[in-house]
Amino acid sequence: MAEQQTPNRSRHIEVTPDDLPLHCPMPSMLLWNAHPRVFLPIEQTGEALCPYCGTRYTLTGGAVSGRH
């Protein structure tokens, strides 16, 4: 089953280490109204905020130790 696409609007999204490297918009977001892809450094703090759309990302399990 295909993943449902969602509108791009400010919200909170939890991501897993499998989603790294993290970028916004994510593949599940609609592309026709997307901003340029931006990679977000989430590994050290466990949180990131997209400077374009304001989406807040939280890494499940928190910061990832040993990743660069």
Image (tube, grey):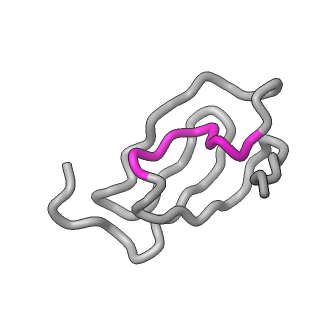
Residue located 20% across and 66% down the image: 65
Residue placed most toward the observer, 52 or 32: 32
Residue 16 point in image, percent of width and height: 47, 65
Q: Residue furthest front?
A: 1
Left or right of 47, for residue 24: right
Check the image and report above or below for 1 versus 29: below
Main SS, magenta region, reads loop
Corner quadrant of residue 57: bottom right
Q: Residue at x 40, y 77 (%)?
A: 61
* Magenta stretch: includes residue 28: yes
Q: In terms of depth relative to the viewer, which is nearer, 7 or 45? A: 7
Q: Is residue 36 above or below residue 48?
A: above
Tell me which residue sits at (74%, 48%) in the image. 10
**57 relative to 8 in the view: left or right:** left
Q: Is residue 22 left or right of residue 5?
A: left
Residue farthest left in this picture? 66
Give the magenta range. 20-29
Q: Is residue 20 left or right of residue 66?
A: right
**Would you identify the image quadrant in which residue 32 lies?**
top right
- Residue 33 lies in the magenta stretch: no
Give the number of callouts. Answer: 0
Residue at point 58%, 39% (across, down): 24
Could you say where residue 1 lies in the image, as x and y percent from the top left? 78, 58
Q: Locate residue 18, reporting x and y percent.
A: 43, 59
Examine the rendered structure and indicate whether residue 58 appears above or below residue 24. below
Residue 66, percent across and down?
A: 15, 62
